[in-house]
Every structure is written in structure tokens, then in C-alpha cells.
Image (cartoon, rainbow, N blue to C red):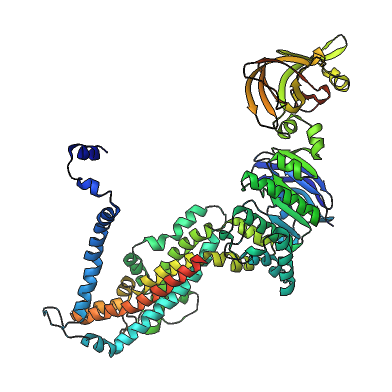
Amino acid sequence: MAEVSIRKLNKMFDVTHVVKDVDLEIRDKEFVVLVGPSGCGKTTTLRMVAGLEAITSGQILIDDSVVNEVPPMDRDIAMVFQNYALYPHMSVAGNMAFGLKMRKFAKPEIETRIKRAAAILGIENLLERKPRQLSGGQRQRVALGRAIVRDPKVFLFDEPLSNLDAKLRVQMRVELKKLHERLGTTAIYVTHDQVEAMTLGDRVVVMKDGWVQQVGEPLELYNTPANRFVAGFIGSPAMNFIEATLGESNGAVVAEAPGLRLSLPGPLAARARAKAGRAITLGIRPEDVHVATDSDPVDLCFDVIVEVVEQLGSEILLDTRVGPATVVASVEPTMRIRSNERLRMSLKPERLHLFDAETEAAI
Amino acid sequence: MAVTALATAEGKRPSRLRRLEDERWLALALLTPTAVLLGLFIAYPFFEGVMLSLSSTRVGEPGHFVGLKNFHKIWNDSIFHTTMWNTFWYTGVTTVFKLALGLWLALLLNRHFRGKAIIRAFILLPFIIPTVLSTFAWKWMFDPTFSVINWTLFQLGLITARINWLGDPDLAMTSIIVINVWRGVPFFAITLLAGLQTISPELHEAAAIDGARPWSRFWHVTWPLLMPVTLVVVLFSVIQTFADFQLVYVMTGGGPANATHLFATYAYQLGIGTGLLAEGAAISLAMFPFLFIIVVVQLLYIRRVETR
């Protein structure tokens, strides 16, 4: 049982303010992912939880006790580092045993734990090897094993998969998820890869420039992003953004941009009506844009010129031009479309997002 | 290419440049300069030294082959015994202190603090100043009459009479050991610092999270990872200290009463000072088996440490 509370957490490096008023309640057994671009403060936040970085202001609590001044070794946490940080002069078994030896566990207990962890990770036959005799994926497993044997209150992961090749990364991602389901230990996971964040996290924390942008379950971030940054960061391929102005005609709220005139559906129109006449950003995900059919209402259609056709097998990505804007659409793989073709496109109105052009907050 | 093309076009035999494309010829061409230099400046003098030590040559007397007579003579020479003991003592004690102090300094310098770069540069000073110059400065500090050390101790009320640093056999040996340590610590500190900087800080963080206190982190992580560098530094230092000459020559000249002679100074004194060239050569060569064993043992050990 371990809950982690982060309250008004701040970190300054000299004059650089890298973590700003971060508030986060992590529940027992929860897998929380901190995600964001480089320099967003996610790793620094994690390192403060680990006790590797001093806290400038704010509080970190593990199970209701403030750990601000508690050294890393006494926080009962385990961390998996980006570069694995295996002790190069120790064998795999030695690496896994080190933390237990330091905590004065009895030898038989150490051996039992190592065997159990090795079995979980499938590294029983590597125990006598040195880290340099291992592949990247194997090192990653050993680093995980070193964390598992300790049976800590909280696992901390600092971009653990970023050094693996794409295929291995997907495989390890699945294994991490299984591992968490099996062990049920509270985990904080840092990554810059939104796919990892979406697939692994029970909840995802999106950060930018030291600020938390949004905290929520993966689908919540995908469906109702709090601002333009989250909308663009979550989802692949990224959401399309079109600069537009809001207007009213015949009682309907319409968003207008060069080559585009969409009337907003009911609930969105209700929220947007107050901003009529103002500049906004329209957001629509590529998977919510399709080639128009006769059943699509005219006021949700727009004409495009196809610039690039990317055949991915499972789908086709169309890079199209609407006035000055580029709109990417994901369409059925069976469609035969060539570049420079003129097409009429439509979209799912309930999937439209509006953002204030100035504050970038969702409307 | 142009050369090759011409050669084939005119049907001539391959030019000399063409021959270098054969690796055997290329290896020969590249190795020859080094082999010549090594032969001329190391192998030949060594060989001459061996021949000299087996002869009865003195200054002004070409001499003739006498077999191992010179070695037999120095083996029964009590000053040579003292010299041998001195050299081992001097090398052993200074190496231990240089390693301990150098490691301590390196660990301090590996931390982040203001003015780190300047202090790192200053640390190197004893190593940069020519040994003869700095040793003369030390000679003044240990001078029987003008010793600043004596003055300080006297002012502090710790002594009442002058200490004759270089006149007493034990104190003289201690003095040169102190100077050698002072001179050698920077080399240890900077090299070990370079070694420390290759150790990823993540390993220390991992160890800290694993529950290792600072001393355990040093003992289980830093020290084993620093071992290969340490062994190389110790190897260099042992070779240099074992064959040290300038420091003792300037400080005591081997005195008082031959109490501080090392192999090199005694060989010089006998060979050049007294003119017994053959015996001097024999003493110089007496260093060889010891150094050889030290080097072989350490290199074997370094190889073992590096491949584990």
C-alpha cells in the first residue's frame, strides 16, 4: 500500500524554474505516467520523488509522511534508469543482490528473491553474466529485476525504454504492463513518448515548461484535451489545427477559415456562442476526417487538394491542403486516391475541438 | 590511381608505391622508423650497459671482460645493501601516501564547487615545476640554519632546539619521502580524477536508492570501477620512483653517510663520481630485475581487472 502526494512542488536550478507548482495525488497500485517534451520538468519531478534532487518548495508525501528531507535509501523506492545504470563490475545476480545486501537481508532470502525475479523476467540463464555481455533488452530486464527484488513501495521509471529499438520497445512495453498487473506496485513512469503514456498509464500527466497541463485517464486526454498543447501532443498522427474565426448565421454558430465554413453542432455551438467574432483554433483528429459521401450534410463538408498519399497498409494518410492550412486525414486503405486529386471531405461534428486562439484553452 | 593506371598502360613492373599496397611491405615501412629509434636509443645503450657491467672499465681505462665480478662485488657491498633497502622503502612509502592523498584530493575535486577549474589547475603546480627547482626550494626549507619549518615549530613552542633535517639519517629519508609525495600527489590526483569522471553519476544514484551509504558507495561502486586507472597510475609511479635520481641528488646527494642513496644516485656516485664505470653500470642494472618483476606482475593484474 503506497500513495504518493505531490503538493505545490517547485524546483529552481539557479535562476531557471523547471518545475512549477506541481500538484498530484497518486493512488495505491496506480500506474501514473508523466509525459511531455524534453525540458518539461517530468524527469526532475521524478528525481525529486526519488530524493536525488533537492526540493525548492512544496512537499512530497509517501503514505502520508513528508519525505522532503528523507534520503533516497530510506524512501523505500526503486528506480529504473534510462541508461540502466547497472554496476558494470558485478554479475547480473550481483546487481540484483546489491540493494538487498545493503539492507542486510539474509543470504537465502536474497537468493530466493533473485530466483523469483529472474523467473518473472526470463533471465535465469543470465545470472552469472556481466552487464557488458548483455544486449540492451536484457540489460533492461536486469534493471527491472534489480527494482523488483527490493519489493519497494513505489517504482520509479525514468524513460526506461528509450534506448531500445522500436520492436523491442513495443515488446517491453507490453511486459511492463503485465508486470505491473502482476505486482500491483504503485508506479511513476516518465516518458516523452505519448504512445507509451497512453498504453501504460492508468492516468497520464501531461507537462510542458514545468507546468502540469492536464491529468487524466488516457481516453479522457484523447477525447477532451484541456488545451491545444495536450490535443496536439496526445494522439498519432497529431491533431489538425486550423486558424478560424467564429461567426453566427441564421442562429447557427459557424467557424470560418479560407476554403472552409463549418457549422458547429449543438453542444459545441452553445459553448462557442459567447466567443462569436473572435479568433479560434479548430482542432480535428485525422481519424475523424473522411471522404464526403452524399449523406454528409453540406455545412460540414469542405474541398481539398491531395498533396501526399501515405499508404500504411492498415490505413491511408492523406496530406491535403485547405486554403493555407494542411489537413491530414486517415482514410480506408481500399480507397484509390492519387496526389493532386481534388476531393470533398467531411468530418464527425461531435469530434470537433475548439481552442481559444489567445489562451489556447479548450472551449 | 594515376600511378597504377600508368604502370599497367605501359606494361612496366609495379612501381614502389604499388608495392606498399601489400600489407607486409606497408607494415615493414611503418615499423622501421620506430624500430630504428628504439634500437638506437634503448636497445643499444642497454646492451652497452650490460657489456660495461661485465668489464673492468674505469675512467681512463678501457678495461676487459671480467664476467660477473662486478656483480659479486656490489653484492658484498654494505652500501649497496642500504641502497637496495632505501629504494624499496622510499618507493613503497611514497606510493602508499601518494595514492591515499591523491585519491582523497581527486574525490574532493570531483565535487561541484565554485572555482573548481582554477583549483584543479593549481593542484598540478608541484608536478609542473621542474623537480630540480622545487627541490632547491625544499632544500631551503629543510636547511639546518634557515629552515622555515624549524622556525615555525619553534615559534609554536613545539621545539626548543634546531632539528637537523638532512643531517640525521632517518630524518633525511623522511624529508625526501615528504618531498616526493608532495611532487607526486598531483599526478595521482589528476589521473584518478579523470578516472572518477568516467564513472556515471547514475551508478551512484542507483546505489543510493539501493540503500548504500556514502562509504558503501565508495567501497562497492567507485573503488572497483577506479581500479584499472589506479593500477596504471601506481605502475607509472612505482617505475619513476624506483629509478628516482634528481630529488635525492639535489637534496642530500645520497648522504648523510650514504643513508639516502637510491639505485640511481649510488650508481651515479660510483660510476661518474668515483670513475668506477663498470661497477656503476652493474648497480644500474641491478634495478632491472626488480622493475621487470614489478611491471610484469602489475600488467598481468591490470589485464585481469580490465577483462573481468
Q: Quadrant of residue A262?
A: top right
Horizontal side, residue A54 vs residue B301: left or right: right
Q: Quadrant of residue A223?
A: top right
Q: How many marks?
A: 0
Residue B109 x, y percent position in the rendering? 53, 59
Q: Is residue B168 visible?
A: no
Work out which quarter of the rendered image holds the N terminus of chain B and state it: top left
Residue A79 x, y percent position in the rendering? 70, 56
Comparing A81 with B244, the one in front is A81
Horizontal side, residue A50 vs residue B120: left or right: right
Residue visible at 52% across and 57% down? B198
In this view, the residue farthest toward the bottom is B76
Residue visible at 60% across and 53% down? A136
In the image, is residue B172 above or below residue A176?
A: below
Comparing B175 with A169, the one in front is A169
Comparing A201 with B282, the one in front is A201
Horizontal side, residue A50 vs residue B58: left or right: right
In the image, is residue A144 above or below residue A192?
A: below
Q: Is residue A346 visible?
A: yes
Horizontal side, residue A178 vs residue A169: left or right: right
Residue A48 x, y percent position in the rendering? 71, 51
